[in-house]
Amino acid sequence: MTSLERLALALASGLLWCVVLLAVGARARRLARLPARPGERQATDFVLGGWVVGATMLLCGLLGAFRPAVLLLAAGGLAACGRWKAPVRWRDLAPPGAACLVLLPLALAPPFFFYDALVYHLALPWQALQDGRIAPHPEDLFAAFPPLAQLVAAAPLAAGLDRVPALLHLASFVLAGGALAALAHRIGAPSWMAALAGAALPLLPALALVPGLPAAEGWLLAALLAALSIALDPRERPGRAALAGFLLGCGSAARLQGIAWTLIGIGVLAASSRRPLRRAAAAAAGAIAGSAPWWLKNLLLLGSPFAPVGWRREGIDLARALVAALAPHLSYLLPLSLAALLALVSGRARPCLLLGTAALAGLLAWGATGTLPRFLAPTLAALLALTAAAGRTPAGRWAGGLVLASVTALGMLFTLREVKRLGIVPAGLEGQQAAAEAMLSNDPLPVFEAAGFLPADSRALFVGEPRGFPFPRRFVCPSQHDVSPLRGPLERLPSAGAVRDWLLQQGYTHLLINRGELARLAGRYPVLPWASEAGRLRFQELLDLLAPPVARAGEAGLFALGP
């Protein structure tokens, strides 16, 4: 298959999966009798469809049936049950869709350059496919994270379509942009300013190309913005509060940041309601159900439903202390904030005040849940909606329109520059794979490819290599935030031979070691498999005992534990 044919297949498959999610979500919404208004309907159906598909994949995994044939059959069955006649308001999706076209070539590129995808967004469903089930992996912090996006990615990965997860994530930003426009219109924004706010969302520099990558931010935003639009609807129809809560729960099932926003969203719903306690209770029940793929999975596998919340491990403080200064983002954050203030005097005062309070609460939550700039996206989305709502007066239209246009233009220029800087798209169709792999630090892919010749029942323990995708056999791959399972045996057992025997008893057949990546990460993360000089010497003795490696590329090697 040529590169062009692969891209065409990926694009067609991605579009098909998007339509399937919309159809499945529309059917689920109709069966549950959850009313959605036109502006938020597409995002609602997309998220509900993702939840139904993800929950089905989770059930297959917990039952030990996480096999390609089973997953694809289950996905096909859900598609057959979808409501295919559900109307789609394409004009609502046109502005964010046009903005996302800039990121489409990136989404169609090989995923090997995105570290987070290789560590967990793609690696965890891929690991479950190799295991044939969703198993507990307490050695990997990310295995306890909300799994919704990973579960949705499982069936495309089972079909060999590794670019579809990125396309689905890009589609989630299109739907999130449509929901943002509906939210802005709900609080008084003119249609054109609401549409411009939706178009600006996927181009925000804080997101730094993430919409075009296999990640989870878009799933949170689509769910959250649709929920906030429902929460600020003055018409309190039956079922709307439960739907808003369910969407908030889906956001929590997609990203840890969704937990704080679930509480914020329920607060907005209660404060805007004439029956606050009843509607808050309905929303809370919906949120518990919507977040079930996360807490139920962790309860069954780890006995800790809200993991990793409350965990205290070596390295976890580093995960929470990833500090990125706001200074590079003040060029658009300050104008957005100032224009948003105009909405408090020119928009619908109470809804704007509630959304502004939610944005402030989200900023505080951002400081507590990891201050990477892209985690600020929900707050920035609220500011975009408020800026658009300032357009109810002539002065607000001028000021807000200028700010929105400037933010969109800045985001477009930033996105184009970053895409060009990566060099993947300019490399052309034939050079994309090589360009993507060239961006890998201490590239493990040649060793991964060699592992395809191992026996089917092989199982490898990774040391100093947190990237598990696309290793073709069963593997255990601690993240960079976790202590290696090998550290304990190296420190307490008397010899390298005893350590090898321990590994064999644990069911491992191979050891994959990436010395280059180990050295790169060791300065910031607890990845060293030893805690003392004696442990380091025993590790070297173990490598000498297992030498030579069955496969080697650069500083990465694959060692057999047995004869």
Image: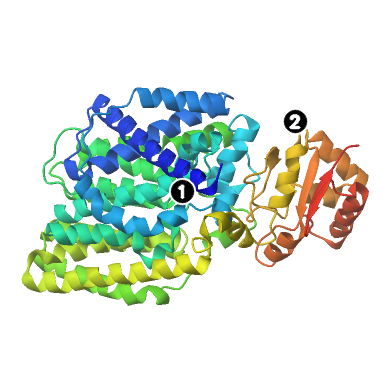
Q: Is residue 345 above or below residue 311?
A: below
**Residue drawn where x is 85% and y is 54% of the image:** 539
**Residue drawn where x is 26% and y is 41% of the image:** 42
Q: Residues within 10 Å of mark 1 (few under 14, many from 20)?
A: many
Left or right placement of residue 104 versus residue 243 in this view = right
Q: CA distance from mark 2 to mark 1?
A: 30 Å
**Which of these two is toward me, 202 or 149?**
202
Q: Is residue 191 above or below residue 229?
A: below
Tell me the element at label 2: loop
Left or right placement of residue 362 versus residue 466 in this view = left
Looking at the rendered structure, the kind of residue marked 2 is: Asp
Q: Residues within 10 Å of mark 2 (few under 14, many from 20)?
A: few
Q: Tag on residue 433?
A: none
Q: Position of residue 518 (x, y in %)?
A: 73, 60
From this viewpoint, which residue is outermost toward the left? 394
Residue at the disc numbered 2: 457
**Which of these two is toward me, 435 or 359?**
435
Query: In the image, which is nearer the foreground, mark 2 or mark 1?
Result: 1
Looking at the rendered structure, the kind of residue marked 1 is: Ala
